[in-house]
Image: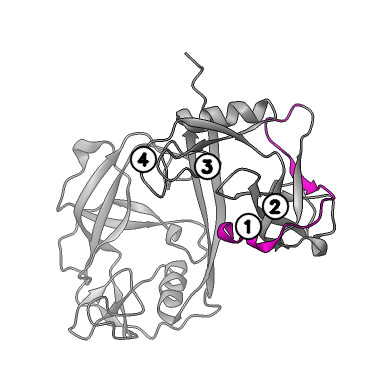
Amino acid sequence: MPDILSAPLVVEFPFTRSLGPVQSAFLTGLRERTVLGVRTGDGKVLVPPVEYDPVTAEELHELVEVAATGTVTTWAWNPRPRRDQPLDTPFAWVLVRLDGADTALLHVLDASGPEAVRTGMRVRVRWAQDRTGAITDIACFEPYGSEPGEAGEPAPHEGEFTEPVTGIVTPARLDYTYTPGRAQSAYLEALADRRVVGERCPSCRKVYVPPRGACPTCGVATDERVEVGPRGTVTTYCVVNIKAKNLDIEVPYVYAHIALDGADLALHARIGGIPYDQVRMGLRVEPVWTEGSRHPDHYRPTGEPDADYDAYKELV
């Protein structure tokens, strides 16, 4: 019985977006300890506010100020907070309908335990000490003994602040453990021996690399292993001009789709050993392995004549 392969993987990137006038006012308002909503054509107040009516698609711009108190409409207990969550102690995820609003805001409630949380309980905003114009300016919600309606109706607000927030950067990160199946385990084990193995579909007879355990075209299981390459042909490529975090490769460099000899699916890899502006479709390449590596570091030109376009056009 072969060993089951597994490896920790992290996908992480910063998501940057600009803000329209409504979202800008909402986040800037949080920095100033003010919660703003937007009124729709039928009189409903949406918090968090949106730029367009979700029902009619009408552009929205009438801002109103709602209270920093509200009512829990539903909740779920989180006994084990994860990295970068709002609180480092157990808490409740809650939907809170703030007084004056007709929709609920998702945030967290600082409570002693699940027995202290209930639908319908009254809560209020606990503001963060340092506020920058982000949803985290609300540090959390906390239990509060007021009665609904004490804050009155939402008041009109111009949404004008000094130094408004015009853009945000949201870090996105996914941590998980990847365990390949039978087909990809065989592929990875072959790479450790500096071989490339695919699988042939019993129906259409195409060879897929990396193998997936099933033909993506016919939908039937594959188990016939076929060794391909190691040489191949560049079918298409892009020039990378932005240096990735924690990647020790100088820009610009080329990332390409490479159709290995004998394969019917192009895989992607970096092209080296040639100036970036000399990489071209049809270029014949071969893998370059580094000492101790389980996979090719990059592909380099073989020196062969370029492949004819008709030989790889179906893989572009």
Examine the structure image and report whether residue 299 is included in the region drawn in magenta.
yes
Query: Distance between the Cα atoms at labels 1 and 4?
Result: 25 Å
Which of the two labelled residues, at mark 3 and mark 2, occupies the earlier sequence position? 3
Q: Which residue is mark 2?
A: 233
For the residues bearing labels 4 and 2, Cβ distance under 8 angstroms: no
Q: Main secondary structure of the magenta part?
A: loop
Q: Is residue 179 visible?
A: no
Examine the structure image and report whether residue 293 is included in the region drawn in magenta.
yes
Q: Which residue is mark 3?
A: 207
For the residues bearing labels 1 and 2, Cβ distance under 8 angstroms: yes
Mark 2 residue element: strand
Q: Which residue is mark 4?
A: 220
Which of the two labelled residues, at mark 3 and mark 4, occupies the earlier sequence position? 3
Mark 4 belongs to which amino acid? Val
Find residue 72 and name its label.
Answer: none
Mark 3 belongs to which amino acid? Val
Highlighted range, magenta: 292-316
Q: Which residue is mark 1?
A: 312
Q: Name the spot of residue 19 as percent of width and height, x first.
A: 48, 75
Most foreground residue, 56 or 62: 56
